[in-house]
């Protein structure tokens, strides 16, 4: 696919805007849920002081030093709120060494809704987060993010123009593109009779041989992809009849699910607790790396199509360590550093020069860098967050998990 074709495809998939009403409906399901989410990270209170320090030692750090951000007084701490296992431990250690950062704290959230609800509940103390792109406008409107000084992030020049100037940030002042990917089916080959190639086959296997051994990521938008695309509808549908059909499918499979889990689902596949997962490619390069290399674990983009997503780096409005945050935003897009990110998390980089440092087998993996025919079947997320029917179905579905 040429750059021109990719640009057209991405813009087609990301054409709809999120609005303030939709943002608040999706992320503020009520004062109680916002409060509980704000208190849910490692038992901390609403001020949510970060508590999980990244301490993994590097095993294969990049061999050349990354260039630094423009000179500034770099603070000794950086507090990050992010998806689980979404940054290479080697890069975190390299960053600490290069910039004299003594404490790199990495707290995790299960989904975008938890991230936003925690902020709405009064959480503070974080420097950096990584929301999915369509959540950025609402975070800006709510005052959660600060405008970026791009002169302090010169490595944004490495980001493919396809991922710039899109509707969620037309001037590219509030976010820096991170990784992109799809939502699909992870599997353990030896524990199932066949590898599902479609959402329909996945559906039948959940009710059959994979009953009690299937996990879905704990993310409403990603889960709705499965029934809607299986039925031949847009994953963004807000049609009452179509959503009712999706509801019936979700309630039908709910008793057969082992769990909703966005953080540990790779381990569940590794130890055989689960054999199928509705999720993302990340575990193939982490918990399931050995199994993936051996052909035992893999990922399928279902034939009916699926979701295209893009995650972003943002700086919190009241970041306590802004200089360290700017240093990170520039450091992470140094080509060799960014190449290590893709090698670690198995999500496609938006950084063109970084591809030189990505394992060729990963670059050639269609599950990570989709080919033309798969790109054509992908659909970007639109603003469905204000739809009460979806919210009600999600809550009902969760209440039925595991029987």
Image: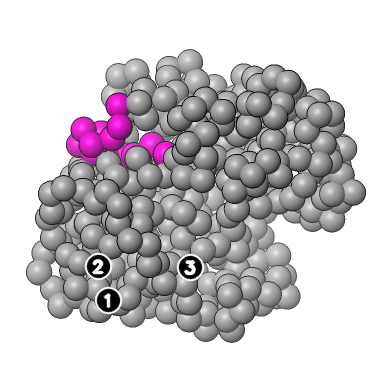
- Is residue 17 visible in this depiction of the protein? no
Which residue: 77% across, 47% down? 258
Q: Residue at x 31, y 65 (%)?
A: 147
Q: Residues within 10 Å of mark 3 (few under 14, many from 20)?
A: many
Look at 70% across and 65% down and name the residue there: 29
Counting from the top left corner in percent of width and height, residue 355 is at 25, 34
Residue 118 lies, with reference to residue 18, above or below; the image says: below
Sequence order check, earlier mark of 1 and 3: 1
Q: Are marks 1 and 2 in contact (CB under 8 Å)?
A: yes
Q: Give the quarter of the image for residue 125.
A: bottom left
- Quarter of the image with the N terminus is top left
Instruction: Point out residue 348 in the picture as x, y percentages from the top left corner.
Output: 38, 36
Give the secondary structure at mark 3: strand
Q: Secondary structure at mark 2?
A: helix
Instruction: Indicate which disc residue 102 carries.
Output: 1
Q: Give the mark nearest the N terminus, 3 or 2.
A: 2
Instruction: Identify the residue under disc 3.
Output: 107
User: From where the camera sits, is residue 252 visible?
Assistant: yes
In magenta, the rendered stretch is 346-360
Residue underneath mark 2: 96
């Amino acid at each position: 696919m040429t750059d021109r074709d990719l640009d057209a495809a991405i813009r087609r998939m990301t054409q709809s805007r999120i609005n303030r009403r939709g943002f608040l409906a999706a992320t503020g399901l009520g004062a109680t849920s916002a409060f509980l989410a704000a208190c849910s990270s490692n038992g901390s209170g609403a001020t949510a002081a970060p508590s999980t320090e990244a301490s993994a030692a590097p095993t294969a750090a990049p061999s050349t030093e990354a260039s630094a951000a423009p000179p500034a007084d770099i603070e000794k701490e950086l507090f990050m709120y992010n998806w689980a296992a979404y940054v290479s431990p080697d890069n975190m250690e390299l960053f600490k060494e290069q910039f004299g950062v003594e404490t790199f704290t990495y707290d995790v959230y299960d989904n975008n809704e938890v991230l936003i609800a925690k902020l709405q509940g009064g959480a503070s103390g974080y420097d950096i987060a990584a929301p999915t792109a369509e959540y950025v406008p609402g975070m800006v409107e709510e005052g959660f993010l600060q405008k970026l000084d791009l002169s302090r992030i010169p490595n944004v020049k490495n980001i493919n123009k396809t991922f710039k100037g899109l509707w969620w940030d037309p001037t590219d002042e509030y976010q820096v593109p991170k990784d992109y990917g799809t939502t699909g089916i992870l599997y353990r080959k030896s524990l199932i009779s066949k590898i599902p190639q479609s959402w329909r086959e996945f559906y039948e296997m959940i009710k059959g041989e994979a009953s009690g051994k299937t996990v879905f990521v704990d993310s409403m938008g990603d889960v709705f992809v499965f029934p809607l695309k299986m039925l031949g509808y847009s994953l963004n549908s807000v049609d009452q009849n179509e959503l009712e059909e999706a509801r019936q499918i979700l309630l039908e499979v709910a008793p057969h699910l082992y769990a909703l889990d966005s953080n540990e689902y790779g381990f569940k596949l590794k130890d055989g607790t689960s054999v199928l997962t509705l999720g993302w490619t990340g575990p193939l390069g982490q918990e399931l790396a050995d199994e993936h290399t051996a052909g035992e674990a893999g990922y399928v983009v279902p034939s009916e199509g699926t979701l295209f997503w893009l995650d972003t780096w943002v700086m919190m409005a009241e970041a306590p360590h802004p200089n360290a945050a700017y240093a990170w935003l520039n450091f992470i897009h140094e080509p060799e550093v960014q190449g290590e990110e893709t090698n670690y998390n198995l999500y496609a980089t938006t950084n063109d020069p970084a591809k030189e440092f990505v394992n060729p087998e990963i670059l050639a993996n269609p599950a990570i860098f989709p080919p033309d025919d798969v790109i054509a079947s992908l659909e970007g997320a639109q603003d469905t967050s204000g739809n009460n029917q979806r919210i009600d179905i999600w809550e009902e579905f969760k209440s039925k998990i595991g029987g």
